[in-house]
Amino acid sequence: IKGWFLRLLDKIPGVNNLYKAISDVLGAFVGKEKKFNQPVLVRVSDQMELEMIGFITDTNLSELGHNIEGKVAVYFPMSYSFSGHMMIVPVKNITRIERNSVDILKYTMSGGIVELDPENEGKVHH
């Protein structure tokens, strides 16, 4: 049935690309190749000491061109949604979160209302 469904999608212009994009994103969250496995805090303002929770998704940005040395790609999920923003961030602004990445993803996507399991508590390294 899955094969039939995929062949049907291939025949509908635009729909196949949308299906593949959604499938890839969902696979990154819950599939075999979980991509959101490096949770980090990213300093976005020194004045306000403001930080955001994100996930490093790429550490080799050479394909993007020049002026990216010392930077990584970080995905910032939005609360109550499977959408988010990807930003190129200087490594100096990143602090790794030493916790289970699935717990951090649930915490972030719930807007911070999901309680983190104290047994999974770790240290935050700068």
Image (cartoon, helix red, strand yellow):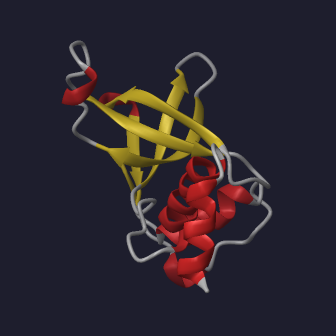
Residue 83 picture location, percent across and down: 67, 46
Residue 23 picture location, percent across and down: 56, 62
Q: Is 37 left or right of 80, judged from the image as shown?
A: left
**Does residue 19 appear in this view?**
no
**Does residue 15 appear in this view?**
yes
Residue 5 picture location, percent across and down: 63, 74
Query: Is residue 112 or residue 122 the one in the foreground?
Result: 112
Tally the marks.
0
Residue beneath the point at 62% across and 49% down: 18
Residue 34 picture location, percent across and down: 43, 68
Q: Is residue 49 above or below residue 19?
A: above
Residue beneath the point at 26% across and 41% down: 59
Query: Is residue 8 or residue 119 the one in the foreground?
Result: 8
Q: Quadrant of the N terminus?
A: bottom right
Q: Is residue 88 above or below residue 73?
A: above
Q: Is 50 left or right of 66, judged from the image as shown?
A: right
Which quadrant of the view contains residue 97?
bottom left
Query: Is residue 16 or residue 121 the one in the foreground?
Result: 16
Q: Residue furthest front?
A: 11
Q: Quadrant of the C terminus?
A: top left
Residue beneath the point at 56% across and 58% down: 10
Q: Is residue 3 above or below residue 70?
A: below
Residue beneath the point at 63% across and 66% down: 8
Which quadrant of the view contains residue 37?
bottom left
Q: Is residue 111 above or below residue 44?
A: below
